Image (cartoon, rainbow, N blue to C red):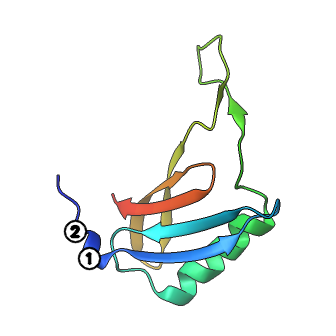
Amino acid sequence: MQRDTDKAVVIEGVAHNGKPCRIVDNTGTVARAELEALLAELIEQRRFGLSGRSLAGSASIRLGEPDFTHIQLGDELYRFILLPYEARIEVF
């Protein structure tokens, strides 16, 4: 599936450790104010940066593994991908 990058909305910020971070709405459908609030919440919760995680059944820890989940914004459900310094919102 090809992504239409012309509609992506990018909001940039600074993580708790002073490094640049951002949220990217690849759908282009989420209100800018909602994206800014979500980015601020992610920064406040210290969700950006390297983290080590071991996937179920794995004996190894991988640094910087993306975290995949879903998020509801308004009435819409989106795929939410959290990378070390970038959060992405994509079509579910």
Q: Is residue 53 above or below residue 84?
A: above
Q: Callout 1: helix, strand or loop?
A: helix
Answer left or right for 81 relative to 19.
left
Q: Residue at x 54, y 79 (%)?
A: 35
Separation of disc 2 and disc 1 at Cα? 5 Å
* Quadrant into which the C terminus falls: bottom left
Q: Which mark is residue 6?
A: 1
Which of the two residues, 92 or 54, is positioned nearer the viewer here? Answer: 54
Q: Is residue 54 left or right of residue 29?
A: right
Q: Residues within 10 Å of mark 1 (few under 14, many from 20)?
A: few
- Marks 2,1: beta carbons within 8 A: yes
Q: Is residue 49 above or below residue 35?
A: above
Determine the secondary structure under disc 2: loop
Residue 64, x across and y down, in percent:
62, 38
Q: Amino acid at mark 2?
A: Asp
> Residue 20's x, y, as percent?
67, 65
Q: Identify the residue under disc 2.
A: 4
Q: Classify 10 Å Cα crowding around label 2: few (below 14), some (14-19), many (20 and above).
A: few
Residue 32, position as x, y percentages in the image: 50, 87
Please name the residue shown 33% across and 71% down the image: 27
